Image (cartoon, rainbow, N blue to C red):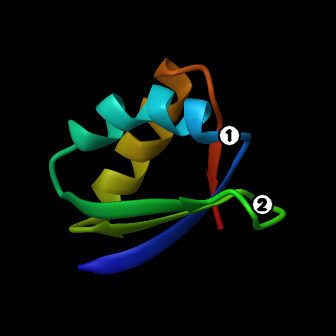
Amino acid sequence: METVNFSTNLKCNGCIAAVKPSLEAIEGLSSWSVDLNSPDKLLTAEVASDQVTGSIVEAFKKAGYEANQK
């Protein structure tokens, strides 16, 4: 497993709830959390491969949000 970080444009728990179903459907994503208190609204994820990072970005896009790998 590898830990990856993304800056996001999530603003609240409602935003997190909007992306949660898409993130939980990603195979190879074992855990994730969002720190809304950080300036970058940091998403930290445990992934099995680099392919999973692309899936995270796509999941955010589908939900109407952005995630950029740091």
Residue 48 in picture, x, y percent from top left: 21, 68
Residue at 46%, 32% in the rendered image: 17
| Front in this rendered view, residue 54 or 62 | 62
Q: Amino acid at mark 1?
A: Cys
Residue 13 in picture, x, y percent from top left: 58, 40
Q: Is residue 52 above or below residue 26?
A: below
Q: Is residue 66 above or below residue 47?
A: above
Q: Tell me the quadrant of the picture where the N terminus can be found.
A: bottom left
- Residue corresponding to mark 2: 40
Residue at 30%, 53% in the rendered image: 52
Residue 29 in picture, x, y percent from top left: 25, 57
- Residue corresponding to mark 1: 12
Helix, strand or loop at disc 1?
Answer: loop
Is 12 situated left or right of 19 in this image? right
Residue 62 in picture, x, y percent from top left: 48, 20
Is 61 situated left or right of 8 in this image? left
Is 60 situated left or right of 55 in this image? right
Q: Tell me the quadrant of the picture where the C terminus can be found.
A: bottom right
Q: Is residue 27 above or below residue 65?
A: below
Q: CA distance from mark 1 to mark 2?
A: 13 Å
- Picture quarter containing residue 19? top left
| Front in this rendered view, residue 36 or 62 | 36
Q: Residue furthest right?
A: 39
| Front in this rendered view, residue 33 or 70 | 33
Mark 1 vs 2, N-terminal side: 1
- Picture quarter containing residue 49? bottom left
Asked if the residue under mark 2 is in contact with the one under mark 1, i.e. CB atoms within 8 Å, the reply is no
- In this rendering, the label closer to the viewer, 1 or 2: 1
Q: Amino acid at mark 2?
A: Asp
